[in-house]
Amino acid sequence: MIWKHCRWVKKMRTLAIVIKRQPTNEYDLLVTLYTQELGKLTAIAKSALKPSSTQGSHLDSYNLIDVELVDGKSWPIMAGAQCLDGRRHIKSSLSSLAIAGFFTEAIHKIVFDGQRDDELWDFLNNVFDSLNGPKGCDDATFAGFQRELITVLGHGAQKENLQATLDRLANARLASGSLLRRVRVVLQ
């Protein structure tokens, strides 16, 4: 029970970045967030997949949202979500989309739930703000972001390949890394 390991409260409002979303039950979404107050957590968005849902459209991947969480039986429940930054430029560029997917997969697989980290919060916002800019992200900037992520995660300067280091930290090969390589080949 992730919520119980975090600061136990009956109701909380915080900023969050949508890391991952997956359907559960008929109309519900299980949404993994990286929140400013609680770190990474998974919450359930009841009825978010219904066509009449006002909350569902705010829960796109990479969005910066203002979310209200209430205590649930096994997962926190998203009582409301308001999109503050939809990051449209990321979603309109295949390269930026692949890079954003790489970092969200890395966070999802490497970072433990319920551990607040202000430095990681700032890092994620910086990456998404850069990707959302008009220039996007070139290879040198991407490598710099990989190095910075490894440092923020507390692993210092690595001599080995950055991708290999992140794969090792995730205890698995990051699938988005191979997607990113294919996208780069297609775009060149």
Image (cartoon, rainbow, N blue to C red):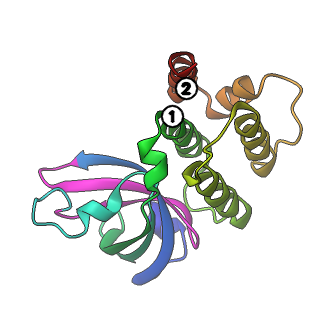
Give the residue type that dot 2 points to.
Leu
Position of residue 11 relative to residue 187, above or below, is below
The residues bearing labels 1 and 2 have C-alpha atoms spaced at a distance of: 5 Å
Give the position of the N terminus as an image quadrant. bottom left
Q: Nearer the viewer, residue 87 or 75?
A: 87
Kindly identify the residue that appears in the image at 21 percent across and 61 percent down: 48
Measuring from the top left, give residue 16's x and y in whole percent. Answer: 49, 66
In terms of depth relative to the viewer, which is nearer, 173 or 187? 187
Q: Is residue 79 above or below residue 91?
A: below
Residue 124 horizontal/vertical position (percent) = 63, 55
> Which of 25/144 is in front?
144
| 15 horizontally vs 76: left or right | right
Q: Is residue 68 left or right of residue 155?
A: left
The disc, 1 or 2, on the residue closer to the chain's N-terminal end is 1
Q: Are marks 1 and 2 in contact (CB under 8 Å)?
A: yes
Is residue 110 left or right of 64 when viewed as pictured? right
Q: Which residue is mark 1?
A: 98
Identified at 62% across, 46% down, the residue is 135
Say if the magenta span includes residue 82: no
Q: Which residue is mark 2?
A: 180
Place of residue 161 in the rendered image (x, y in percent of width and height, measured from the top left): 79, 22
